[in-house]
Amino acid sequence: MKPKIDQEKCIGCGTCPAIDGEVFEMQADNKAHVKEGVDYNAHQNQIEEAKSACPTQAIEVE
Ligand code: SF4
């Protein structure tokens, strides 16, 4: 399932794109964003890992 990032909570630490750069990317606003058009189900383990690792619990999985 596609993850969501609460932009209010994201502090731009860079952890989630370090875990899975195919799903998460930093953008010019210095916050992480979810890339479009990804087979999210194929990345479920990494998405869960990123969710657990996020220091501000900004990542939500629908
Ligand atoms: Fe933002 Fe959390 Fe990703 Fe860090 S791990 S960039 S705080 S969403």
Image: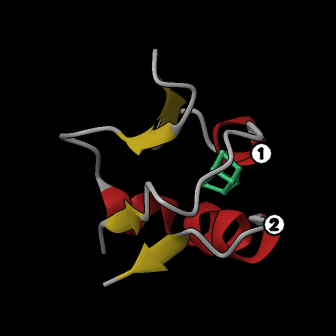
Image position of 28 with respect to 8: above or below: above
Q: Residue furthest front?
A: 8
Residue at image position (62%, 75%) is 48
* Type of amino acid at the residue the image marks with label 2: Pro
Instruction: Residue 53 in the image: state x and y as whole percent.
Output: 81, 67
Q: Nearer the viewer, residue 42 or 58?
A: 58
From the Cβ of disc 1, is ligand 1 less than 8 Å away?
Answer: yes
Indicate which disc residue 40 carries: none
Q: Which quarter of the figure has residue 57? A: bottom right
* Type of amino acid at the residue the image marks with label 1: Thr
Indicate which disc residue 55 carries: 2
Residue at image position (46%, 15%) is 28
**Whether label 1 touches label 2, CB < 8 Å:** yes
Instruction: Residue 27 in the image: state x and y as whole percent.
Output: 46, 22
Which element is circle 2 on? Answer: loop
From the Cβ of disc 2, is ligand 1 less than 8 Å away?
Answer: yes
Residue at image position (30%, 75%) is 1
Q: Marks 1 and 2: which is nearer the front?
A: 2
Q: Which residue in the protein does label 1 denote?
A: 15
Q: Residue furthest left?
A: 37
